Image (cartoon, rainbow, N blue to C red):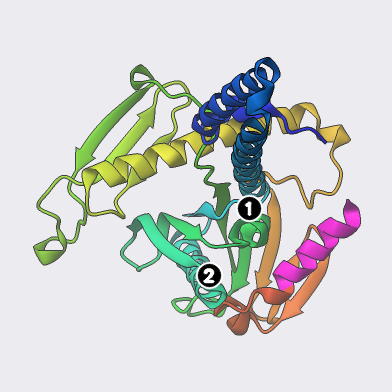
Amino acid sequence: MQPDLEQFRRNQKTMYLMQEYDRLQAAITDTEKTASEDPSLADLAKEELVHLQAQQQALLVKMEEIVAEDKEEAEDPRRMVLEVRAGAGGDEASLFAYELAEMYRAYAEAQGWSFTVLDESKNDSGGYKEASFEIEGKGAYAALKYEMGVHRVQRVPATEKSGRVHTSTASVAVLPVLEHAEIVIEDKDIEVDFSRSGGAGGQNVNKVETAVRIYHKATGIMIRCTSERSQLKNREKGMNILRSKLAELKLEEENAKHAAERKGQIGTGDRSEKIRTYNVLQDRITDHRIKESWHNIPKILAGGMDPIVEALQQAETAAA
């Protein structure tokens, strides 16, 4: 199969290699012309052609590898943002959101993935009102994409004197970070503010304004990034996340148009879909999309998510 040279010209990562490819092609054409016009130079030209064509072939191999890596990243991005947000249930909901975040942290560390806090907002009980994290590693998005949706916990809160069971919720959003998402954002489309990182006071407060808040006017999307020590790096990371969120919006619109045609997807993939119930009294977790349950909630919340992830992956494969 002939390589797609036009694709290489359009790709930002390979276009500079195509310039060298075209230079070599011009040299090949000149060498062939010289050989045809002067037979005495035919042997020398033949050696030169072999050398030029070998260089050209090496460039093609390199460009094909780059395009293949891009395709692999699009299908299974190495970087993702995971957001947790407390829902109904007051302090109990925020504590549950925190427990979910800790579950993902433990699972990520067990897989050898990096887990970085991008931003977090806690209440007085120590739970998360909302928080966002960056997870990076091979297979991270493929494993955690199924966590998107509303998680529900049923249990007796520690502060409940009468032993009454409470139901609380937390929502999870999972967003692949595509380094080269084809989303153009102009300066006029956004507002960027800077502030100090930290917030508890004392030595924890950064004296330099490194925290970045990016507001996208058209969609109302707000990104806040505090994980890096420099303003520039936080802005760069925030813009990458914004591009990914805009790409997600675009994908959601396309999915809505073709919802009836979709196959092989577990659930709707919507962040408002009720996907899982954690019944603490019965020590049972049920995923409503595949109607399957698991026991030993403490182990799962400690990062033992493998059985759930594997079951969801198998269900998606079977549905494809």
Marks 1 and 2 sit apart, C-alpha to C-alpha, by 16 Å
Q: Is residue 87 visible?
A: no
In which quadrant of the rendered image does the N terminus lie? top right
Query: Identity of the amino acid at label 2?
Result: Ala
- For the image, the number of numbered tags is 2
Vertical order, 10 against 96 (above or below) = above
Of the image marks 1 and 2, the number of the one nearer the N terminus: 2
Q: Is residue 251 left or right of residue 119?
A: right
Cβ–Cβ below 8 Å for labels 1 and 2?
Answer: no
In percent of the image, x 59 and y 83: which residue is there?
Answer: 298
Residue 239: name its quadrant: top left
**Residue at numbered disc 1:** 148
Query: Foreground: 55 or 127?
Result: 55
Q: Is residue 263 visible?
A: yes
In percent of the image, x 18 and y 61: which residue is there?
Answer: 200
In percent of the image, x 21 and y 38: which residue is there?
Answer: 194
Where does the image place residue 275, in percent across and percent down from the top left?
Answer: 70, 57
The numbered dot on residue 195 is none
| Element under disc 2 | helix
Task: Tell me if residue 123 is in the magenta stretch.
Answer: no
Where does the image place residue 150, in percent across and percent down from the top left?
Answer: 63, 54
- The residue most toward the front is 40
Magenta residues, as a range?
308-320
Vertical order, 184 against 165 (above or below) = above
**Residue at numbered disc 2:** 108
Query: Foreground: 314 or 232?
Result: 232
